Every structure is written in C-alpha cells, then in structure tokens.
Amino acid sequence: MINQQAARMEIGSELERRHSEETLKDRYADFTAKYLAVWHLQYLAETKPHLITPETIASLEALLQDEAVKHQTQAYFMYKAIGNALCATLIHAERLTERVLVALRDVLGKIHGTGHRAIAEACGSLPVAIRGPAIGLDTSEECPALSWSQLTQETGLAQEETVRREGRSLVVEGCEEAAVMVFKMARAGEPAESLYREAAWMEYFAGLEHDFPIRFDIPRIRRVKDARVFRMSGACDAWHEISGLHPARYAIAFQVHPDYFCYPNETKGLCGREFRETMLRNAWLLGRLTSLGIVHAAPISLFHNRAQAPRRGDQGLYEWVRGGRLDQWLNSCAFPNLGRSGIRDFEHFVSFEGSSLELYRHMGRHFLSLLLVIGSWFRNKDPQRVGIDHHGNPIDARDLFEKRPLRDLIEGLFLHYYQGFVGRAFVGGIPVHLDQLCARMIEEMGVDRHMEEILRVTDQRRMTESDFRRYLFDQGFDEGTISSIKKGARDIRILSGPHLGGFNERISLPELIEAVGTMSALCVLGRYLHRRGRDFSLMLLATAD
C-alpha cells in the first residue's frame, strides 16, 4: 500500500514537472504563471532532482530568450529564479552537471542586461564555504607619544637619514639592506582603529607560513615601546608638509621593500613587460588571499559620486552590480593599493564571514579595479591629454591604447585571479567577447566625453564655508571666481572628470560591468566544482569569441 502511494506521488510530481515545462513554453501563459512554474522546477531540483531532465533545462533556457519576459518590469526576478533553478540542478542533480554548464556558458556569453546580471549572481551564490581568519585587533593597548628623536632611537635610525614624503607617510632609507622604514599616519576623521587593523594583519602574516609561490613583499610591523600604534608628538621637516592628518598624530611604523611605493601605472611607471608581470601577479595574489577569506576591500577607491558621499547611505561608494556612472575613473587609479611589491595598504583587509554572493561582489570589485588600472596605464603614457580642449571638445586619446596587448592583459588577469582563487588553472576560453570589450574600453576610456559633475545645493549646505571654498579650489576654480559664488545659492557645474557616464546616468561602459560579473561568477563556479571534484566540467566553458 505504501509503495503504491509513493508511486502515485512520484507520477504526480512528474506530471507537475511536465506541466511546469509546458507553462514556460506557452506563449499565452502570463508572467506570474511562468514565474511560479520556474519556482516549482527549482523546488523539484532541490527535493526530487531525479525528476529533472535535459528538457527541463532547455525550457528554462528558452524562457531566458523570451522577448515578452525581457520587457516586463519585474524581469530581473524572473531571470534570478531561472538562475536559481539552474544552480539548484547543478547542486542536486550531478548527472546533469555538463548540461547545466553548457546552459550557463551560453547565458553568460550571450545574454545581456538584467538577464546577465541575474544569472551571474545566481552562479555567484553557489556555496563555497570561505571564512577568514581571526586577527588580534586590540585597540586598548597604551598609545605612547614620541618625538622624532625618540622614534629614530627606538627604531634604530640615524637622525640625519634622508626622509621623504609619500602621501601621508614618512619614508626613511637605510634602515636595513633592501628595506625602508615607513611611518604611516592616520588621516583627519579616521579612527586609530584602521592603523591597529593594518598592524594586526602584518603581524598575522608574519606569524604564518602561507603558500605564496610568487613575489609578495609583506611589510613587517615595528613595535615602538611595545606598542603597535603610537602618537608622533614631533617630527622632521617633511612631517610638517603633510596636511589633513589626525590631530592626535596616530601612526604606525613598518619596514618594507622600497618597491612598496612603486605604482604600476604612474606616469613614469613600468614598461609594458614589467606592467604585465606586476598586474598578473597582483591578480593572482588578490585571488589567493580571497580564497583564504582575506578580502581587500579597496584595491582602488571607487565612487558613484564623491561630492554626495556625506549625505548618501552608501557614502557614495560604487556598487558595481548596479552599473551606475563611475566617478572620476582616472583619478581613482592614481594610487592603486597594488604595486611592484604586491598588495599594499593592509588597513583595507577584512576577514570575510558572509555569503557567497557577498564574496562574488567583492571579487567583482577586484576585477573592476584591475581593469580600470589597465586602462589608466595606457592613458598615463601621455597624462597631459585629459579633459577638454580649448574648443570645448573632449580629448581623444584612443591612439594611446593598443588592442592586442589590452586583450592579452584582460585575459591574463582573469586566468591568474581564477587560478589564485580556485586553486587550479581555468580550462577553455572565457565566455566574454574580449575583442568587443577591448573596442568599447578604448572608445569610452580613450575619449573624455563625460567631464561634468553637478555640486547640488543640498551638498553645498552640508559644507562649511572653508570646505566649500577648498573644494572649488581643488576643482580648478580661481580665487576670484570662488569669491563671486555664494554657497547654497544654486547648483554649480564642475568639470571634474573624466567619468564613465553622465551625471546621474548609467555607466557608459556596461560591457565592462558584464565582463566583471562573468569573471566573478566563473570564479565562484570554478571553486564550487573543484571542491566537489568536478574539474573536468570546466572544459565545457568554451570561448564566446
């Protein structure tokens, strides 16, 4: 009796599956009916995966191509449900792994817009179980105040050593062969905690043997009077040249290779071969560290709108999945937190503890940062060619780019990051139209079409008078013009670009966002498969070019 009842339930479930598949194919079925049918197929994939067939996957693929769905206001949620159903099949019905991978390859390579975003996010949500290490972030220790002479004595430096300024840091040569001493100070408005975090990460790496088979010069923290963070009560002349420091003068000291301050894309930076080696090595390191749950949250500073940062819930930070306008992309690349010595600025490391989707978004930020730095390297061959000319026309610097090296760099970044994160080489080609992506990057990064920013009245009123004047001065306004402008009287047009996209518009390079989504999704997908011993399946991810 029980067996008969089970058999009837099985038949009923199979009939329901067929009905759901037919609903997806029925052009007269409404959006809600199709959404519920997709949800039911996902439920079957999770609870009765033996009922899912190649025809089920084909019906889900066909719905992704349905033009009627594409134009629905809620299309993203339908696409996300389809992605979840495909990934549920990948997880629970291993016999269909190859068929699902073919579907995902085709979708990531051919579908655009919200459909692409939804499927990439579904892949990016596959379970990879990454959790970062615990670090000792004790901010209660004593924070001694030291003069410059005391600091040099404590760190073994001669007071007559040459001191130079690097941003908010003082750098002293000769502390040790092939090393420099760095005194890094907290910025105004920045809590001392960021310096404690950076010091804690340096000590964490010093106490462990990590497998970094390529160059990664990890800074060595120097405790001063047994304290990681101290206060500089007085310093050398170079110290007084640094503005915008925390009034308490919090600082840390560390030793590092002199290449720590060698940025790969600076105006007198690395040659093509050296740049490629540096970028690919840093891509691998970012991937490897992320696989350990050590996530660098800011390879470069990315903003949607810097001016609105104080009044936005997201502080104006760029959320790449939304595909909005990218603020001052070239300026964002000026001092990347990766260089010849490897990853730098450990204050931005976070010990990851979250969902795969959160990790996917972090990886997307990594890929976007790396790709932007590549674009800036080409532009920095002639850094004076930026903005608009004397006729008001956008500067055209497309001739600074070389398509073949650009394509090789993009492909190399992905392959190295993937290997660092997944733990094995990617097999096959990337389902990204690399030639088209290169052409679009050259078109949008090579011509400064989007220079304008609007300083809203609301944002002006949040500034003090001195901050308002300083902001305008930093944007190129002369003193006479600044004196004639009344704060908060009207919106002010500022040429602060180049930006990628017009003010309050979408990014002008959506192909870049889709490529970033695809690369990040492939990394999560690859790690998921690798951990389940299904590496062979990646051979199905053939190139889309």
Image (cartoon, rainbow, N blue to C red):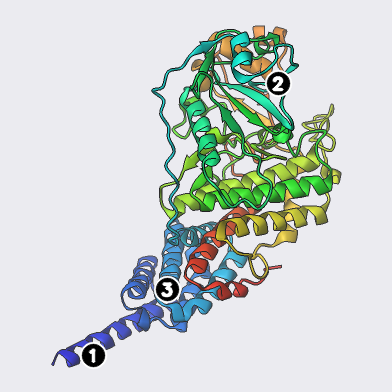
- Depth check: 255 or 324 in front? 255
* Residue reaching furthest to the left: 1
Judged from the image, the secondary structure of the residue bearing numbered disc 3 is helix
Residue 112, position as x, y percentages in the image: 59, 60
Q: Looking at the image, which residue is at 52% across and 57% down? A: 117
Residue 339, position as x, y percentages in the image: 70, 39
How many discs appear?
3
User: Taking the image as drawn, is residue 243 in sight?
Assistant: no
Sequence-wise, the earlier of marks 1 and 3 is: 1
Quarter of the image that includes the N terminus: bottom left
- Depth check: 408 or 455 in front? 408
Q: Looking at the image, which residue is at 53% across and 24% down? A: 223
Tag 1: amino acid? Ala
- Depth check: 7 or 538 in front? 538
> Residue 172 has which mark?
2
- Depth check: 138 or 335 in front? 138
Task: Determine crowd level at label 1: few under 14, some 14-19, many 20+ residues with C-alpha closer than 10 A.
Answer: few
Quarter of the image for residue 128 reads bottom left
Quarter of the image that includes the C terminus: bottom right
Q: Which residue is mark 3?
A: 89
Judged from the image, the secondary structure of the residue bearing numbered disc 2 is strand
Tag 2: amino acid? Val
Q: Which residue is mark 1?
A: 7
Judged from the image, the secondary structure of the residue bearing numbered disc 1 is helix
Tag 3: amino acid? Thr
Task: Determine crowd level at label 3: few under 14, some 14-19, many 20+ residues with C-alpha closer than 10 A.
Answer: many
